[in-house]
Amino acid sequence: MSKPRTPSVWLSKAAVNGALVLAVVYMLFPLVWLLTAATKDAGGLLAGNAFSFEGFDLGGNLSRLAEYNDGIYFHWYLNSLLYAGVGALACSLVSVAAGYAFDKYDFPGKEKLFGVVLLGVLVPTTALALPMYLLASEAGIVNTYWAVILPVLVNPFGVYLARVFSAGYIPDEALEAARIDGAGELRTFWSIGLRMVMPGFVTVFLFQFTAIWNNFFLPLVMLSDQKLFPLSLGLYSWNSNAHAEPDFYPLVVTGSLLAVVPLVVAFVSLQRHWKAGLTAGSVK
Amino acid sequence: MKARTRAAATLLTPFFLLFTTVMVVPIGYAVWLSLFTEKQSGLGFGGAETVFSGLDNYTAALGDRAFLEGFGVLLGYCLLYIPLLLAGALGLALLLDSALARARRFFQLALFLPHAVPGIIAALIWVYLYTPQLSPVVQAMEAGGIGFDFFSPEGALPSIVNIALWEWLGYNLVIFYAALQAIDRSVLEAATVDGAGSWRVAFSIKLPLIRSSLAMVALFTVIGSLQLFTEPLILNKGTGSAVTSTWTPNMYAYTAAFDRNDYGLAAAASVLLALTAALLSFAVTRLTGRRGGRRGTGRRKEKAA
Protein backbone atom coordinates (compact mmCIF):
# COMPACT_ATOMS: atom_id res chain seq x y z
CA MET A 1 0.00 0.00 0.00
CA SER A 2 1.45 3.35 -0.90
CA LYS A 3 0.74 6.22 1.41
CA PRO A 4 -0.55 9.46 -0.09
CA ARG A 5 1.56 12.11 1.58
CA THR A 6 2.91 14.66 -0.87
CA PRO A 7 1.09 16.76 -3.49
CA SER A 8 3.00 14.81 -6.15
CA VAL A 9 0.91 11.78 -5.25
CA TRP A 10 -2.19 13.69 -6.24
CA LEU A 11 -0.52 14.61 -9.48
CA SER A 12 0.36 10.96 -10.18
CA LYS A 13 -3.13 9.92 -9.29
CA ALA A 14 -4.54 12.43 -11.76
CA ALA A 15 -2.10 11.24 -14.43
CA VAL A 16 -2.91 7.55 -13.92
CA ASN A 17 -6.66 8.05 -13.93
CA GLY A 18 -6.45 10.58 -16.74
CA ALA A 19 -4.64 8.08 -18.94
CA LEU A 20 -7.25 5.43 -18.15
CA VAL A 21 -10.07 7.84 -18.97
CA LEU A 22 -8.42 8.66 -22.32
CA ALA A 23 -8.23 4.95 -23.10
CA VAL A 24 -11.91 4.55 -22.21
CA VAL A 25 -12.83 7.42 -24.53
CA TYR A 26 -10.96 5.73 -27.39
CA MET A 27 -12.73 2.44 -26.64
CA LEU A 28 -16.21 3.83 -26.26
CA PHE A 29 -16.56 6.63 -28.82
CA PRO A 30 -17.11 4.26 -31.78
CA LEU A 31 -19.92 2.62 -29.77
CA VAL A 32 -21.43 6.01 -28.94
CA TRP A 33 -21.20 6.87 -32.63
CA LEU A 34 -22.98 3.61 -33.48
CA LEU A 35 -25.74 4.53 -31.04
CA THR A 36 -26.27 8.06 -32.39
CA ALA A 37 -25.78 7.07 -36.02
CA ALA A 38 -28.49 4.44 -35.70
CA THR A 39 -30.97 7.23 -35.06
CA LYS A 40 -30.32 8.91 -38.41
CA ASP A 41 -31.52 8.37 -41.95
CA ALA A 42 -29.13 8.22 -44.90
CA GLY A 43 -29.27 11.99 -45.39
CA GLY A 44 -28.44 12.68 -41.74
CA LEU A 45 -25.61 10.16 -41.78
CA LEU A 46 -24.06 11.62 -44.88
CA ALA A 47 -24.34 15.11 -43.43
CA GLY A 48 -21.71 13.85 -41.04
CA ASN A 49 -22.72 15.33 -37.67
CA ALA A 50 -23.43 11.88 -36.33
CA PHE A 51 -22.44 12.57 -32.71
CA SER A 52 -25.77 14.19 -31.95
CA PHE A 53 -29.36 13.12 -31.74
CA GLU A 54 -30.33 15.76 -34.29
CA GLY A 55 -32.89 14.43 -36.75
CA PHE A 56 -33.81 11.57 -34.43
CA ASP A 57 -35.50 8.77 -36.35
CA LEU A 58 -34.57 5.50 -34.65
CA GLY A 59 -38.15 4.30 -34.92
CA GLY A 60 -38.13 4.89 -38.67
CA ASN A 61 -34.87 2.98 -39.04
CA LEU A 62 -36.19 0.09 -37.01
CA SER A 63 -39.35 -0.19 -39.05
CA ARG A 64 -37.38 -0.01 -42.30
CA LEU A 65 -35.13 -2.74 -40.88
CA ALA A 66 -38.19 -4.86 -40.11
CA GLU A 67 -39.77 -4.24 -43.51
CA TYR A 68 -36.85 -4.59 -45.86
CA ASN A 69 -37.06 -7.79 -47.88
CA ASP A 70 -39.90 -9.19 -45.74
CA GLY A 71 -37.99 -8.74 -42.51
CA ILE A 72 -34.98 -10.80 -43.58
CA TYR A 73 -32.95 -9.03 -40.89
CA PHE A 74 -34.90 -10.68 -38.08
CA HIS A 75 -34.60 -13.96 -39.89
CA TRP A 76 -30.81 -13.49 -39.67
CA TYR A 77 -31.19 -12.61 -36.02
CA LEU A 78 -33.00 -15.86 -35.30
CA ASN A 79 -30.38 -17.76 -37.30
CA SER A 80 -27.59 -16.22 -35.22
CA LEU A 81 -29.43 -17.12 -32.03
CA LEU A 82 -29.90 -20.66 -33.29
CA TYR A 83 -26.30 -21.16 -34.47
CA ALA A 84 -24.81 -19.58 -31.34
CA GLY A 85 -27.27 -21.06 -28.85
CA VAL A 86 -27.35 -24.65 -30.07
CA GLY A 87 -23.71 -24.63 -31.14
CA ALA A 88 -22.41 -23.25 -27.85
CA LEU A 89 -24.59 -25.55 -25.76
CA ALA A 90 -23.46 -28.69 -27.57
CA CYS A 91 -19.85 -27.52 -27.70
CA SER A 92 -19.77 -26.81 -23.96
CA LEU A 93 -21.20 -30.22 -23.18
CA VAL A 94 -18.67 -31.97 -25.41
CA SER A 95 -15.79 -29.88 -24.00
CA VAL A 96 -16.75 -30.33 -20.37
CA ALA A 97 -17.13 -34.10 -20.81
CA ALA A 98 -13.66 -34.30 -22.34
CA GLY A 99 -12.10 -31.92 -19.80
CA TYR A 100 -13.62 -33.92 -16.96
CA ALA A 101 -12.26 -37.16 -18.38
CA PHE A 102 -8.78 -35.65 -18.70
CA ASP A 103 -8.92 -34.37 -15.14
CA LYS A 104 -10.53 -37.24 -13.25
CA TYR A 105 -9.35 -40.40 -14.99
CA ASP A 106 -6.02 -42.03 -15.61
CA PHE A 107 -5.54 -43.95 -18.80
CA PRO A 108 -2.58 -44.84 -20.97
CA GLY A 109 -1.40 -42.04 -23.27
CA LYS A 110 -3.46 -39.42 -21.46
CA GLU A 111 -0.96 -36.58 -21.50
CA LYS A 112 -0.01 -37.29 -25.12
CA LEU A 113 -3.65 -37.10 -26.11
CA PHE A 114 -4.03 -33.86 -24.17
CA GLY A 115 -0.98 -32.54 -26.03
CA VAL A 116 -2.89 -33.16 -29.28
CA VAL A 117 -5.76 -31.05 -27.92
CA LEU A 118 -3.35 -28.25 -27.06
CA LEU A 119 -1.87 -28.42 -30.57
CA GLY A 120 -5.42 -27.99 -31.87
CA VAL A 121 -5.56 -24.62 -30.12
CA LEU A 122 -2.73 -23.44 -32.35
CA VAL A 123 -4.26 -24.41 -35.70
CA PRO A 124 -5.24 -21.29 -37.66
CA THR A 125 -8.92 -21.99 -38.24
CA THR A 126 -9.23 -19.92 -41.40
CA ALA A 127 -6.71 -22.19 -43.10
CA LEU A 128 -9.20 -25.01 -42.53
CA ALA A 129 -12.17 -23.23 -44.08
CA LEU A 130 -11.44 -24.15 -47.69
CA PRO A 131 -10.87 -27.91 -47.18
CA MET A 132 -13.86 -27.89 -44.83
CA TYR A 133 -15.98 -26.34 -47.56
CA LEU A 134 -14.89 -28.93 -50.09
CA LEU A 135 -15.51 -31.78 -47.65
CA ALA A 136 -18.90 -30.32 -46.80
CA SER A 137 -19.81 -30.11 -50.46
CA GLU A 138 -18.79 -33.77 -50.92
CA ALA A 139 -21.04 -34.61 -47.98
CA GLY A 140 -23.81 -32.51 -49.51
CA ILE A 141 -24.23 -30.24 -46.52
CA VAL A 142 -22.96 -26.97 -48.03
CA ASN A 143 -25.63 -24.30 -47.71
CA THR A 144 -27.37 -26.00 -44.80
CA TYR A 145 -27.48 -25.28 -41.06
CA TRP A 146 -25.14 -28.24 -40.51
CA ALA A 147 -22.32 -26.62 -42.46
CA VAL A 148 -22.18 -23.81 -39.92
CA ILE A 149 -23.03 -25.76 -36.76
CA LEU A 150 -20.78 -28.84 -37.07
CA PRO A 151 -17.40 -27.05 -37.22
CA VAL A 152 -18.17 -24.86 -34.20
CA LEU A 153 -18.88 -27.83 -31.96
CA VAL A 154 -15.15 -28.28 -31.54
CA ASN A 155 -13.15 -25.97 -29.34
CA PRO A 156 -9.85 -27.38 -28.07
CA PHE A 157 -9.39 -24.35 -25.85
CA GLY A 158 -12.75 -25.18 -24.27
CA VAL A 159 -11.43 -28.63 -23.34
CA TYR A 160 -8.36 -27.04 -21.79
CA LEU A 161 -10.54 -24.63 -19.79
CA ALA A 162 -12.87 -27.45 -18.77
CA ARG A 163 -9.95 -29.48 -17.43
CA VAL A 164 -8.74 -26.51 -15.37
CA PHE A 165 -12.27 -25.89 -14.05
CA SER A 166 -12.84 -29.57 -13.31
CA ALA A 167 -9.66 -29.63 -11.19
CA GLY A 168 -10.75 -26.49 -9.39
CA TYR A 169 -14.43 -27.19 -8.78
CA ILE A 170 -14.87 -30.96 -8.41
CA PRO A 171 -13.20 -32.46 -5.35
CA ASP A 172 -12.29 -36.12 -5.83
CA GLU A 173 -13.95 -36.90 -2.49
CA ALA A 174 -17.36 -36.03 -3.93
CA LEU A 175 -16.83 -38.57 -6.72
CA GLU A 176 -15.60 -41.21 -4.28
CA ALA A 177 -18.71 -40.70 -2.16
CA ALA A 178 -20.93 -41.19 -5.21
CA ARG A 179 -19.06 -44.36 -6.15
CA ILE A 180 -19.44 -45.77 -2.65
CA ASP A 181 -23.14 -45.08 -2.95
CA GLY A 182 -23.07 -47.28 -6.01
CA ALA A 183 -23.47 -44.73 -8.79
CA GLY A 184 -21.98 -45.68 -12.15
CA GLU A 185 -19.20 -43.56 -13.65
CA LEU A 186 -21.36 -41.81 -16.25
CA ARG A 187 -24.12 -41.26 -13.72
CA THR A 188 -21.53 -39.70 -11.40
CA PHE A 189 -20.38 -37.35 -14.15
CA TRP A 190 -23.91 -36.38 -15.08
CA SER A 191 -25.36 -35.77 -11.64
CA ILE A 192 -22.31 -34.75 -9.61
CA GLY A 193 -19.44 -33.63 -11.87
CA LEU A 194 -21.50 -31.59 -14.29
CA ARG A 195 -23.45 -29.89 -11.50
CA MET A 196 -20.29 -28.92 -9.64
CA VAL A 197 -18.47 -27.63 -12.71
CA MET A 198 -21.42 -25.44 -13.78
CA PRO A 199 -19.51 -22.13 -13.44
CA GLY A 200 -16.93 -23.56 -15.84
CA PHE A 201 -19.67 -24.77 -18.15
CA VAL A 202 -21.17 -21.27 -18.28
CA THR A 203 -17.73 -19.81 -19.02
CA VAL A 204 -17.07 -22.16 -21.93
CA PHE A 205 -20.62 -21.51 -23.17
CA LEU A 206 -20.15 -17.74 -23.03
CA PHE A 207 -16.88 -17.86 -24.95
CA GLN A 208 -18.23 -20.21 -27.61
CA PHE A 209 -21.49 -18.27 -27.94
CA THR A 210 -19.52 -15.11 -28.62
CA ALA A 211 -17.20 -16.87 -31.04
CA ILE A 212 -20.14 -18.26 -33.05
CA TRP A 213 -22.10 -14.99 -32.94
CA ASN A 214 -18.99 -13.22 -34.27
CA ASN A 215 -18.15 -15.94 -36.78
CA PHE A 216 -17.93 -14.57 -40.28
CA PHE A 217 -15.45 -16.52 -42.35
CA LEU A 218 -17.12 -19.90 -42.03
CA PRO A 219 -20.64 -18.72 -43.01
CA LEU A 220 -19.11 -16.66 -45.81
CA VAL A 221 -17.56 -19.79 -47.26
CA MET A 222 -20.40 -22.20 -46.53
CA LEU A 223 -23.63 -20.31 -47.19
CA SER A 224 -25.11 -18.76 -50.30
CA ASP A 225 -28.80 -18.83 -49.39
CA GLN A 226 -29.68 -15.50 -47.73
CA LYS A 227 -32.31 -17.23 -45.62
CA LEU A 228 -29.57 -19.14 -43.79
CA PHE A 229 -27.27 -16.17 -43.14
CA PRO A 230 -26.31 -15.21 -39.62
CA LEU A 231 -26.23 -11.49 -38.79
CA SER A 232 -22.54 -11.07 -39.54
CA LEU A 233 -22.91 -12.29 -43.12
CA GLY A 234 -26.20 -10.49 -43.69
CA LEU A 235 -24.81 -7.15 -42.57
CA TYR A 236 -21.75 -7.74 -44.73
CA SER A 237 -23.92 -8.32 -47.79
CA TRP A 238 -25.91 -5.15 -47.09
CA ASN A 239 -22.73 -3.16 -46.63
CA SER A 240 -21.55 -4.32 -50.05
CA ASN A 241 -24.62 -2.58 -51.51
CA ALA A 242 -24.22 0.62 -49.53
CA HIS A 243 -21.75 2.30 -51.86
CA ALA A 244 -24.15 2.14 -54.76
CA GLU A 245 -27.26 2.80 -52.68
CA PRO A 246 -26.68 4.99 -49.62
CA ASP A 247 -30.12 3.96 -48.33
CA PHE A 248 -28.40 0.83 -47.05
CA TYR A 249 -26.23 2.79 -44.61
CA PRO A 250 -28.95 3.29 -41.98
CA LEU A 251 -29.93 -0.38 -42.35
CA VAL A 252 -26.35 -1.53 -41.75
CA VAL A 253 -25.80 0.84 -38.83
CA THR A 254 -29.10 0.13 -37.07
CA GLY A 255 -28.71 -3.59 -37.76
CA SER A 256 -25.19 -3.52 -36.32
CA LEU A 257 -26.41 -1.81 -33.17
CA LEU A 258 -29.07 -4.47 -32.58
CA ALA A 259 -26.53 -7.22 -33.29
CA VAL A 260 -24.15 -5.90 -30.66
CA VAL A 261 -26.74 -5.56 -27.89
CA PRO A 262 -27.02 -9.22 -26.73
CA LEU A 263 -23.26 -9.59 -26.46
CA VAL A 264 -22.84 -6.39 -24.51
CA VAL A 265 -25.64 -7.46 -22.16
CA ALA A 266 -24.06 -10.91 -21.76
CA PHE A 267 -20.62 -9.49 -21.00
CA VAL A 268 -21.89 -6.89 -18.56
CA SER A 269 -24.03 -9.38 -16.64
CA LEU A 270 -21.60 -12.31 -16.75
CA GLN A 271 -18.39 -10.44 -15.83
CA ARG A 272 -17.40 -13.04 -13.26
CA HIS A 273 -17.42 -15.74 -15.93
CA TRP A 274 -15.40 -14.15 -18.70
CA LYS A 275 -12.85 -12.92 -16.21
CA ALA A 276 -12.62 -16.45 -14.81
CA GLY A 277 -12.15 -17.82 -18.33
CA LEU A 278 -9.46 -15.33 -19.26
CA THR A 279 -7.68 -15.91 -15.97
CA ALA A 280 -7.80 -19.67 -16.23
CA GLY A 281 -6.27 -19.38 -19.66
CA SER A 282 -3.40 -17.19 -18.60
CA VAL A 283 -2.36 -17.33 -14.97
CA LYS A 284 -2.56 -21.08 -14.52
CA MET B 1 -10.67 -49.89 -12.86
CA LYS B 2 -12.03 -51.11 -16.19
CA ALA B 3 -15.27 -49.23 -15.66
CA ARG B 4 -13.29 -46.02 -15.26
CA THR B 5 -11.33 -46.50 -18.45
CA ARG B 6 -14.56 -47.19 -20.27
CA ALA B 7 -16.14 -44.05 -18.80
CA ALA B 8 -13.13 -41.96 -19.83
CA ALA B 9 -13.38 -43.31 -23.35
CA THR B 10 -17.11 -42.58 -23.51
CA LEU B 11 -16.66 -39.01 -22.32
CA LEU B 12 -13.79 -38.34 -24.70
CA THR B 13 -15.34 -39.92 -27.79
CA PRO B 14 -17.68 -37.09 -28.86
CA PHE B 15 -14.91 -34.52 -28.71
CA PHE B 16 -12.34 -36.59 -30.55
CA LEU B 17 -14.84 -37.70 -33.20
CA LEU B 18 -15.64 -34.06 -33.94
CA PHE B 19 -12.01 -33.03 -33.59
CA THR B 20 -11.05 -35.59 -36.21
CA THR B 21 -13.88 -34.59 -38.54
CA VAL B 22 -13.42 -30.84 -38.51
CA MET B 23 -9.70 -30.46 -37.80
CA VAL B 24 -7.58 -33.50 -38.55
CA VAL B 25 -9.34 -34.61 -41.73
CA PRO B 26 -9.46 -31.07 -43.25
CA ILE B 27 -5.75 -30.60 -42.54
CA GLY B 28 -4.98 -33.88 -44.27
CA TYR B 29 -7.36 -33.02 -47.10
CA ALA B 30 -5.74 -29.61 -47.58
CA VAL B 31 -2.33 -31.23 -47.94
CA TRP B 32 -3.79 -33.79 -50.37
CA LEU B 33 -5.57 -31.12 -52.42
CA SER B 34 -2.45 -29.03 -52.66
CA LEU B 35 -0.78 -31.84 -54.61
CA PHE B 36 -3.34 -31.81 -57.41
CA THR B 37 -4.34 -29.45 -60.16
CA GLU B 38 -7.71 -29.37 -61.85
CA LYS B 39 -7.58 -29.21 -65.61
CA GLN B 40 -10.71 -28.30 -67.53
CA SER B 41 -11.09 -30.82 -70.32
CA GLY B 42 -12.15 -29.47 -73.70
CA LEU B 43 -14.60 -26.61 -73.33
CA GLY B 44 -15.30 -27.50 -69.75
CA PHE B 45 -18.38 -29.56 -70.58
CA GLY B 46 -16.73 -32.82 -69.65
CA GLY B 47 -16.12 -31.57 -66.13
CA ALA B 48 -12.78 -31.05 -64.53
CA GLU B 49 -10.02 -33.56 -64.61
CA THR B 50 -7.79 -33.78 -61.56
CA VAL B 51 -4.13 -34.31 -62.24
CA PHE B 52 -1.40 -35.05 -59.73
CA SER B 53 1.02 -32.17 -59.92
CA GLY B 54 3.40 -32.72 -57.02
CA LEU B 55 4.68 -29.51 -55.55
CA ASP B 56 3.64 -27.40 -58.56
CA ASN B 57 1.00 -25.53 -56.57
CA TYR B 58 3.57 -24.62 -53.96
CA THR B 59 6.04 -23.29 -56.50
CA ALA B 60 3.18 -21.45 -58.21
CA ALA B 61 2.13 -19.79 -54.94
CA LEU B 62 5.68 -18.98 -53.90
CA GLY B 63 6.40 -17.69 -57.39
CA ASP B 64 3.40 -15.38 -57.33
CA ARG B 65 4.31 -11.83 -56.37
CA ALA B 66 0.83 -11.19 -54.97
CA PHE B 67 1.23 -14.05 -52.51
CA LEU B 68 4.67 -12.95 -51.35
CA GLU B 69 3.50 -9.37 -51.04
CA GLY B 70 0.75 -10.68 -48.80
CA PHE B 71 3.40 -12.03 -46.43
CA GLY B 72 5.12 -8.65 -46.65
CA VAL B 73 1.87 -6.99 -45.57
CA LEU B 74 1.56 -9.48 -42.70
CA LEU B 75 5.10 -8.72 -41.60
CA GLY B 76 4.40 -4.99 -41.61
CA TYR B 77 1.16 -5.59 -39.77
CA CYS B 78 2.83 -7.71 -37.08
CA LEU B 79 5.69 -5.23 -36.62
CA LEU B 80 3.23 -2.40 -36.08
CA TYR B 81 0.41 -4.20 -34.31
CA ILE B 82 2.09 -6.58 -31.85
CA PRO B 83 4.35 -4.03 -30.07
CA LEU B 84 1.47 -1.54 -29.87
CA LEU B 85 -0.91 -4.17 -28.54
CA LEU B 86 1.51 -5.58 -25.96
CA ALA B 87 2.74 -2.19 -24.80
CA GLY B 88 -0.76 -0.74 -24.72
CA ALA B 89 -2.38 -3.63 -22.86
CA LEU B 90 0.55 -3.98 -20.45
CA GLY B 91 0.78 -0.25 -19.81
CA LEU B 92 -2.94 0.03 -19.10
CA ALA B 93 -2.88 -3.09 -16.91
CA LEU B 94 0.02 -1.66 -14.87
CA LEU B 95 -1.82 1.65 -14.50
CA LEU B 96 -4.94 -0.20 -13.37
CA ASP B 97 -2.89 -2.31 -10.97
CA SER B 98 -1.10 0.69 -9.45
CA ALA B 99 -2.34 1.82 -6.08
CA LEU B 100 -3.41 5.11 -7.62
CA ALA B 101 -6.15 3.84 -9.90
CA ARG B 102 -9.83 4.32 -9.03
CA ALA B 103 -12.98 2.59 -10.23
CA ARG B 104 -11.07 -0.47 -11.46
CA ARG B 105 -14.09 -2.58 -12.27
CA PHE B 106 -15.58 0.17 -14.39
CA PHE B 107 -12.32 0.67 -16.30
CA GLN B 108 -11.93 -3.05 -16.89
CA LEU B 109 -15.44 -3.41 -18.25
CA ALA B 110 -15.33 -0.26 -20.37
CA LEU B 111 -12.00 -1.20 -21.90
CA PHE B 112 -13.15 -4.77 -22.54
CA LEU B 113 -16.46 -3.83 -24.15
CA PRO B 114 -15.21 -3.44 -27.74
CA HIS B 115 -14.21 -7.09 -27.64
CA ALA B 116 -17.89 -7.97 -27.37
CA VAL B 117 -18.45 -6.34 -30.78
CA PRO B 118 -18.27 -8.87 -33.63
CA GLY B 119 -15.15 -8.36 -35.75
CA ILE B 120 -17.15 -7.67 -38.88
CA ILE B 121 -19.17 -4.97 -37.12
CA ALA B 122 -16.06 -3.44 -35.56
CA ALA B 123 -14.63 -3.23 -39.06
CA LEU B 124 -17.83 -1.69 -40.43
CA ILE B 125 -17.99 0.95 -37.67
CA TRP B 126 -14.38 1.96 -38.19
CA VAL B 127 -14.61 2.01 -41.97
CA TYR B 128 -17.57 4.38 -41.60
CA LEU B 129 -15.48 6.44 -39.19
CA TYR B 130 -12.74 6.53 -41.84
CA THR B 131 -15.06 7.53 -44.68
CA PRO B 132 -14.95 11.31 -45.20
CA GLN B 133 -18.63 11.64 -46.20
CA LEU B 134 -19.81 9.76 -43.10
CA SER B 135 -17.25 10.47 -40.46
CA PRO B 136 -17.30 13.18 -37.83
CA VAL B 137 -13.72 12.15 -37.01
CA VAL B 138 -12.34 12.89 -40.47
CA GLN B 139 -14.27 16.13 -40.58
CA ALA B 140 -12.90 17.17 -37.18
CA MET B 141 -9.41 16.28 -38.33
CA GLU B 142 -9.83 18.32 -41.49
CA ALA B 143 -11.12 21.25 -39.48
CA GLY B 144 -7.95 20.95 -37.42
CA GLY B 145 -5.83 20.98 -40.58
CA ILE B 146 -4.96 17.27 -40.56
CA GLY B 147 -5.64 15.62 -43.87
CA PHE B 148 -5.23 11.84 -43.60
CA ASP B 149 -6.63 9.38 -46.10
CA PHE B 150 -7.32 6.16 -44.17
CA PHE B 151 -7.70 4.20 -47.42
CA SER B 152 -4.51 5.33 -49.14
CA PRO B 153 -1.54 2.98 -49.66
CA GLU B 154 0.19 4.47 -46.59
CA GLY B 155 -3.02 4.75 -44.59
CA ALA B 156 -4.48 1.27 -45.08
CA LEU B 157 -2.13 -0.61 -42.76
CA PRO B 158 -2.46 1.80 -39.80
CA SER B 159 -6.22 1.85 -40.39
CA ILE B 160 -6.42 -1.92 -40.02
CA VAL B 161 -4.00 -1.99 -37.08
CA ASN B 162 -6.27 0.53 -35.34
CA ILE B 163 -9.32 -1.69 -35.80
CA ALA B 164 -7.46 -4.72 -34.45
CA LEU B 165 -6.14 -2.74 -31.48
CA TRP B 166 -9.63 -1.54 -30.68
CA GLU B 167 -10.90 -5.11 -30.70
CA TRP B 168 -8.10 -6.77 -28.73
CA LEU B 169 -6.56 -4.23 -26.36
CA GLY B 170 -9.17 -4.68 -23.64
CA TYR B 171 -9.14 -8.47 -23.89
CA ASN B 172 -5.41 -8.66 -23.32
CA LEU B 173 -5.54 -5.95 -20.69
CA VAL B 174 -7.88 -8.15 -18.64
CA ILE B 175 -5.48 -11.09 -18.97
CA PHE B 176 -2.50 -9.01 -17.85
CA TYR B 177 -4.45 -7.36 -15.07
CA ALA B 178 -5.59 -10.74 -13.72
CA ALA B 179 -1.98 -11.97 -13.78
CA LEU B 180 -0.81 -8.82 -11.97
CA GLN B 181 -3.50 -9.25 -9.34
CA ALA B 182 -2.30 -12.80 -8.72
CA ILE B 183 1.16 -11.57 -7.69
CA ASP B 184 1.85 -12.09 -4.01
CA ARG B 185 1.44 -8.62 -2.47
CA SER B 186 4.12 -9.26 0.14
CA VAL B 187 6.74 -9.39 -2.64
CA LEU B 188 5.70 -5.93 -3.79
CA GLU B 189 5.67 -4.57 -0.27
CA ALA B 190 9.12 -5.93 0.39
CA ALA B 191 10.38 -4.12 -2.71
CA THR B 192 8.72 -0.87 -1.63
CA VAL B 193 10.25 -1.18 1.83
CA ASP B 194 13.62 -1.69 0.16
CA GLY B 195 13.09 1.66 -1.50
CA ALA B 196 11.98 0.69 -5.02
CA GLY B 197 9.78 3.31 -6.71
CA SER B 198 6.64 2.38 -8.61
CA TRP B 199 8.44 2.36 -11.98
CA ARG B 200 11.12 0.08 -10.60
CA VAL B 201 8.52 -2.24 -9.07
CA ALA B 202 6.61 -2.37 -12.35
CA PHE B 203 9.59 -3.20 -14.55
CA SER B 204 11.84 -5.26 -12.28
CA ILE B 205 9.26 -7.19 -10.28
CA LYS B 206 5.79 -7.19 -11.82
CA LEU B 207 6.80 -7.73 -15.46
CA PRO B 208 9.10 -10.73 -14.84
CA LEU B 209 6.42 -12.33 -12.66
CA ILE B 210 3.75 -12.24 -15.38
CA ARG B 211 6.08 -13.53 -18.09
CA SER B 212 3.97 -16.62 -18.77
CA SER B 213 0.89 -14.49 -19.50
CA LEU B 214 2.99 -12.32 -21.80
CA ALA B 215 4.18 -15.41 -23.63
CA MET B 216 0.66 -16.72 -24.07
CA VAL B 217 -0.70 -13.42 -25.34
CA ALA B 218 2.21 -13.08 -27.75
CA LEU B 219 1.60 -16.59 -29.06
CA PHE B 220 -2.13 -16.13 -29.64
CA THR B 221 -1.60 -12.69 -31.15
CA VAL B 222 0.87 -14.07 -33.68
CA ILE B 223 -1.50 -16.88 -34.69
CA GLY B 224 -4.41 -14.43 -34.88
CA SER B 225 -2.40 -11.95 -36.95
CA LEU B 226 -1.59 -14.56 -39.58
CA GLN B 227 -5.31 -15.10 -40.15
CA LEU B 228 -5.94 -11.45 -40.97
CA PHE B 229 -8.96 -11.42 -43.28
CA THR B 230 -12.18 -9.77 -42.12
CA GLU B 231 -10.97 -6.22 -41.57
CA PRO B 232 -9.05 -5.89 -44.85
CA LEU B 233 -11.95 -7.54 -46.70
CA ILE B 234 -14.23 -4.72 -45.53
CA LEU B 235 -11.66 -2.12 -46.57
CA ASN B 236 -11.27 -3.91 -49.89
CA LYS B 237 -15.00 -3.60 -50.53
CA GLY B 238 -14.83 0.12 -49.82
CA THR B 239 -14.36 2.25 -52.88
CA GLY B 240 -10.99 3.75 -53.60
CA SER B 241 -9.09 1.67 -51.07
CA ALA B 242 -5.52 0.53 -51.50
CA VAL B 243 -6.42 -2.89 -50.09
CA THR B 244 -6.44 -5.44 -52.91
CA SER B 245 -8.30 -8.74 -53.00
CA THR B 246 -5.02 -10.61 -52.37
CA TRP B 247 -3.74 -8.20 -49.73
CA THR B 248 -3.07 -10.89 -47.09
CA PRO B 249 -2.23 -14.59 -47.67
CA ASN B 250 -5.63 -15.55 -46.32
CA MET B 251 -7.35 -13.26 -48.81
CA TYR B 252 -5.12 -14.72 -51.52
CA ALA B 253 -6.28 -18.24 -50.65
CA TYR B 254 -9.92 -17.15 -50.53
CA THR B 255 -9.68 -15.40 -53.89
CA ALA B 256 -7.89 -18.37 -55.46
CA ALA B 257 -10.59 -20.75 -54.24
CA PHE B 258 -13.78 -18.78 -54.75
CA ASP B 259 -13.03 -16.33 -57.54
CA ARG B 260 -10.73 -18.49 -59.64
CA ASN B 261 -11.85 -21.96 -58.50
CA ASP B 262 -8.22 -22.99 -58.24
CA TYR B 263 -8.55 -25.24 -55.20
CA GLY B 264 -5.07 -26.72 -55.50
CA LEU B 265 -3.42 -23.31 -55.37
CA ALA B 266 -5.71 -22.19 -52.54
CA ALA B 267 -4.90 -25.33 -50.56
CA ALA B 268 -1.17 -24.84 -51.09
CA ALA B 269 -1.45 -21.24 -49.90
CA SER B 270 -3.40 -22.38 -46.82
CA VAL B 271 -0.84 -25.06 -46.01
CA LEU B 272 2.00 -22.56 -46.35
CA LEU B 273 0.15 -20.20 -44.03
CA ALA B 274 -0.45 -22.93 -41.46
CA LEU B 275 3.22 -23.97 -41.65
CA THR B 276 4.25 -20.38 -41.03
CA ALA B 277 1.92 -20.31 -38.01
CA ALA B 278 3.46 -23.52 -36.69
CA LEU B 279 7.01 -22.23 -37.14
CA LEU B 280 6.20 -18.91 -35.48
CA SER B 281 4.39 -20.61 -32.57
CA PHE B 282 7.44 -22.77 -32.05
CA ALA B 283 9.74 -19.75 -32.17
CA VAL B 284 7.59 -17.69 -29.79
CA THR B 285 7.31 -20.58 -27.31
CA ARG B 286 11.06 -21.14 -27.43
CA LEU B 287 11.89 -17.46 -27.14
CA THR B 288 9.61 -16.78 -24.19
CA GLY B 289 9.91 -20.18 -22.54
CA ARG B 290 13.64 -20.32 -22.00
CA ARG B 291 13.92 -18.05 -19.02
CA GLY B 292 10.40 -17.93 -17.66
CA GLY B 293 9.44 -21.50 -18.47
CA ARG B 294 10.62 -23.24 -15.34
CA ARG B 295 8.94 -20.82 -13.03
CA GLY B 296 5.80 -20.99 -15.14
CA THR B 297 5.42 -24.75 -14.91
CA GLY B 298 6.21 -24.69 -11.21
CA ARG B 299 3.38 -22.27 -10.61
CA ARG B 300 1.07 -24.25 -12.81
CA LYS B 301 1.58 -27.40 -10.75
CA GLU B 302 1.07 -25.50 -7.56
CA LYS B 303 -2.28 -24.23 -8.78
CA ALA B 304 -3.43 -27.58 -10.03
CA ALA B 305 -2.60 -29.29 -6.75
Image (cartoon, coloured by chain):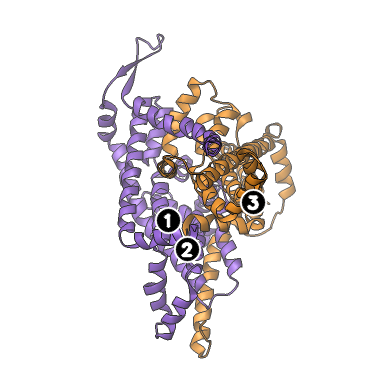
Asked if residue B245 shows in the view, the reply is no
Task: Chain A: give its colour.
Answer: orange
Residue at which label 1 appears: B217
Residue beneath the point at 62% across and 58% down: A271
- Badge 2 amino acid: Phe
Image location (x, y in percent) of residue A105: 51, 44
In the rendered structure, the residue with mark 3 lies on which chain? A
Residue beneath the point at 63% across and 44% down: A179
In the rendered structure, the residue with mark 2 lies on which chain? B
Image location (x, y in percent) of residue A201: 61, 48
**Cβ atoms at labels 1 and 2 below 8 Å apart:** yes
Q: Mark 2 packing: few (<14 Cα in 10 Å), some, or many (20+)?
A: many
Disc number for residue A196: 3
- Badge 1 amino acid: Val
Nearest the viewer among A46 and B266 is: B266
- Note the chain letter of the purple one: B
